[in-house]
Image (cartoon, rainbow, N blue to C red):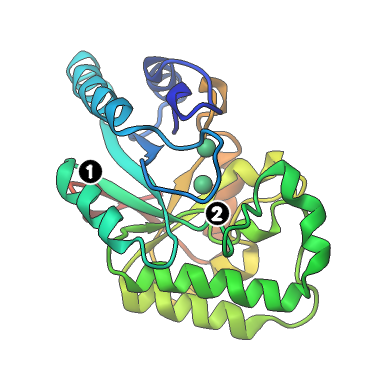
Amino acid sequence: MHSKLCGHAVGEIGEYVERGIALGLDAIGFSFHLPIRIPVDYKINVTREELDFLATEIERLRAKYAGRIPILFGGEADYLPGNEKEVEALAAAYPFDYLISAVHFVGDWAFDHPAAAPDFDRWDLRKLYEAYFGLVREAIRTGLFDVVGHVDLIKKFGHRLEGDWSDIVAELCAEMRRGDVAMEINTAGFDKPVGEQYASEEIVGGAFAAGVPILFGSDAHAPEQVGRYFDRAIALARSVGYTSYACYARQRRRLLPI
Ligand SMILES: [Zn+2]
Ligand SMILES: [Zn+2]
C-alpha cells in the first residue's frame, strides 16, 4: 500500500486499513516509496519528514486496530546502481518489517512513467529486457532487500518479449533463490495496459521450481484497490504449486498457508 504523501496516490492510510479489515486480509503492509534520490524531478517518493510522520502514523494505527489486523511497516526503495549506501542508511534508521526492491529506471529513463511509452521504440526489446533484469538481479545481490517488487514491470505498457526468453527467467529465479528473497505477485498490472499481474505465469512457475517464496501485493494507490484481483493471484500461485506465502516482521520471514 502507498499513501497520498507519495504524490500519486490518494486516501488516508487508515482508510486502507479499514478496507483490509473489510476484506478479511491476514495482515496489511504499507511500503511507501522511500526517500531515495532519483533522476527525475517529479514527486514519487516521500520525503524524510513525510516518512517520519508515516512511521508515527503506523504506530498510532497499530494501537487503534490491535487485535483486528496486523499492520506492517515496509518500504519500497528504488534500486539504482551505486545507491546501496542510501538504502542501507534508511534501513538502519527505521524499524521496517520488510524492504521491497524496485527498478523504475534503466539508466535515467523512467520506463514505467506514462510519458515514457514512446521511448520503448528506441530499444531492441531483448536488449532492454536484459538490461532491466540485469538491474533486478543487481538489486537482489546487494542483500538489502527482503522482497522483489513488481519483478517484470518492464512489460507494463504491453511490451512483452516474444519467443524464448527462458534464459532470462532462469537467471532471475536462480538469483532470487541465492539472495533468499521473496517475490511479489503484484496485481496492479491487471489495471495497466499489459493486463496481467507482475510476475508472468512463466516467472511464477520458475520461482516455484527454484524454491523462491512469494507474497501478494495489490500495490494500492487508493483504498478501494486494496486486495484487488487477489483471487486471480491466488489461483495462479496455486496452479504452479504454491501452498504458502511469505509474511515479514522486522525483516524476518515466516510462511503462512495460502
Ligand atoms: Zn507509487
Ligand atoms: Zn514501484
Which residue appears at 66% of the width and 45% of the height?
Answer: 113
In the image as oriented, which residue stretches furthest toward the bottom?
167
Label 2, residues with CA under 10 Å away: few <14, some 14-19, many ≥20: many
Sequence-earlier tag: 1 or 2: 1
In the picture, the disc for residue 198 is: none
For the point 63% across and 51% down, the residue is 197
For the question of whether residue 208 can be seen, the reply is yes
Camera-near label (1 vs 2) is 2
At label 2, which amino acid type do we have?
His
Q: Is residue 251 visible?
A: no
State how far apart marks 1 and 2 are (Cα). 21 Å
Please give the name of the residue rendered at 35% of the width and 74% of the height, measured from the top-left corner. 141
Q: Where is residue 23 in the image (x, y as percent from the top left)?
A: 46, 25
> Is 6 above or below relative to 256?
above
Where is residue 170 shown, x and y percent of the image?
54, 82
Residue at disc 1, secondary structure: loop
Above or below 39: residue 81: below
Identity, as a three-letter code, of the amino acid under mark 1: Phe
Q: Check the image and report above or below for 148 versus 113.
A: below
The answer to which image quadrant residue 45 occupies is: top left
Observer-nearest residue: 160 or 113? Answer: 113
Q: Pointer 2: what residue?
A: 104
Which quarter of the figure is the N terminus placed in? Answer: top left
Dot 1 alpha-carbon crowd within 10 angstroms: few under 14, some 14 to 19, many 20 or more: many
State yes or no: Cβ of the residue under disc 2 lies below 8 Å from any atom of ligand 2.
yes
Q: Which residue is drawn at 45% across and 73% down?
A: 137
Return the residue nearer the eye: 143 or 211: 143
Q: Is mark 2 on a helix, strand or loop?
A: loop
Pointer 1 residue: 96
State the image coordinates of residue 129 (x, y, percent, origin top left).
66, 72
Q: Nearer the viewer, residue 199 or 114?
A: 114
